[in-house]
Image (tube, rainbow, N blue to C red):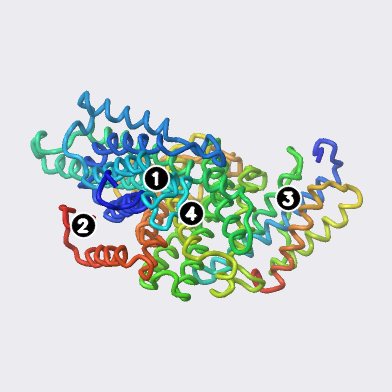
Amino acid sequence: MSAGDGRTVAELLDDSDGLAREALLDMSADRALGMVRGWPQLMRSTAELWAVLPPDPTVSASADPIAILAVMGRAVDRGLGVGHWPGRGSRDEAWEQIASNFVQARRLLEEQPAGSKAVSTDGQIGLTTLKTHTLHALYIAAHATTVALTGYQRDLRHRLEVGARRRQPFTERPTALEVESAGAMIARFDAIEQLTAGSLAARRMDAANEPATGRRRPAMRLDAALAAWEIQSHRTLANHPDPADLVRVARVQALIATATVVVGEAAARRGEIDAGVIDRLSPTLENAQLAWSRSARRWAELTTPASRTDPALVEAAGQLRAAIRAAVANQTGWATPDEIAGRIDLPTTAMTLHRSLLAGVELAYVTREIAADHPGLAAPARVIAMRVQGEAEVAIEQGETRFEGVRWVTTQQLATNQVIPLPEPARRGLVNAATDVAAATNQAVAAAAHLSPAEQAPRERADRARRVGRVAREREIPVRHPNRGGRPR
Amino acid sequence: MNKHAMDVDTAETLAGVVRLIRQAAVLAWAAADRAAAGSAAQLFALGVDLAADQARHLVPDGADIDGPVPVGDEPAGLLRSAELLLRRLAPRAVWEAVDDLRATVAELVWEANTGVGG
């Protein structure tokens, strides 16, 4: 094998996925700028790898986003080249390594026939799976970049505030423009991430159209239902959502978190997933479920008897509920681990649910944006009056004077309980609830980063297990290891 | 279903069905929220919510959904009442959508009585 170090294409992609996950788990704002600078190279190598993989007739065009992602990557590169924030500089080592892995994978595929041992040691991995793995690594990398950028922007804001308070020289504190530029870059990576996520979901849905038998059927049904839900929930929220839609989204996301706990714990009890991973993951998922449920209750206050949920959202939620029920429930509640194992492949389903959690992070931020400034939000006057009073009092206690003496609801509106636009103080509780959801979901996603079946099968992949074990130990020690040179290659 | 052609009695009956199922959903969510995190009760409660959405879409625009809050402490009882109303409706209005809703509500009554949502 002339290209590379003896690793197969599957191993190169697996390693790339692992690197992206570690970056996500790291959640380090310090890496944000390097990630942005490394993105164009990563995207370029992805597009080149993609080009040597043959088109997949079972996957719809909507599930093939690389052309547009490559264009977006080039746009970031152009901006950096002309000095736009953050400008040229050092690139993230992990992103460079993933790009290098993709280049090696492309060369192997150019030189070796598909199905050879250069692709995967057991020759069982198809080109469609390789595409999905490539896309998944890209998705996690985009998400990790977004998370790192968000932390970076938060740090900038904090330093800006502190600098202004302490009257530090302007040269020693960040500028408002930097904060704004970081925000704009977050928005761009949000789009990249969503595009990748939507494409992954669509590929899963296309794959689910293939005939399935035995215990693959409920798993594929769940996979397809999750994919349809992720796409539909984004569509509904992007198109004049009613508070009833937001209630439904929150309730379904809470259920997804719970189903992930059920599947994870079943897998742990049967020894199919490391129990330690599940012990760490379950509380974070329960927190996410509770946060989504609180959010649902807040949005429910804004609904009226006339409220209608988007029929397409109801359909997608119904399909997902039925799929979850078929996979993990019985007549009296959650099915036993053995029952569940008889219906679905537990580690694979846990991974599917984990991917859905990733999409849930984006939904949390979208919900927050809607709560903060969606102009179409309205609610009955009495509910608004009640909420405004409480939120305004809290704001005033926190030093916010804008709300003092303001009358948000007229007597007439109260008397008729008229549906009126949501004023700013009434949005605060919704924003806070969505912020809690985002934080809780992010924690769950980070804790779930080691759910990968490949990382859960030490008997089959001893070398991988040693690597993962070492990474896990490193995480337990609060020491940073910026130099990745020691990582097994 | 042609909602524009719906007579007033049918629309009022469907509005009553919406109120019953929504109140069942309120009770189901209260039970789910009282239960420990991760309770299977949320699976049932979401099902009731979705049935309420389904019912709401059967009611024509402009029809008044508002009305007295149905009396009852148990989701199963309210769902059973909704199912009975839908059964009464069916001979006059044999729409596929009404039949679908009736089947959904009957399934939820069964779920409620077998433990998940009870």
The answer for how far apart the CA atoms under marks 1 and 2 are is 21 Å
The location of residue A49, given as percent across then percent down, is 37, 38
Q: Where is residue B88 in the image (x, y as percent from the top left)?
A: 88, 56
Can you tell which mark lies on residue A134?
A: 1
Mark yes or no: residue A350 visible. yes
Q: Give the number of callouts.
A: 4
**What distance separates the C-alpha of mark 2 from that of mark 4?**
42 Å
Residue ID for mark 2: A487
Sequence-wise, the earlier of marks 2 and 4 is 4
**Residue beneath the point at 18% across and 32% down:** A88
Disc 2 to disc 3, C-alpha distance: 58 Å
Q: Are marks 2 and 4 in contact (CB under 8 Å)?
A: no
Q: Quadrant of residue B116?
A: bottom right
Q: In this view, does A217 lie above or below A241?
A: below
Q: Are marks 1 and 3 on the same chain?
A: no
Q: Provide the residue designation for mark 3.
A: B55
Element on which disc 3 rests? helix
Amino acid type, label 3 = Ala
Q: Look at the numbered discs 2 and 3 and tell me whether their residues touch, using CB distance below 8 Å.
A: no
Residue positioned 46% across, 55% down in the render: A124
Q: Residue furthest right?
A: B91
Between the C-alphas of marks 1 and 4, the distance is: 34 Å
Locate residue B38 relative to residue A98 in the image: left or right.
Answer: right
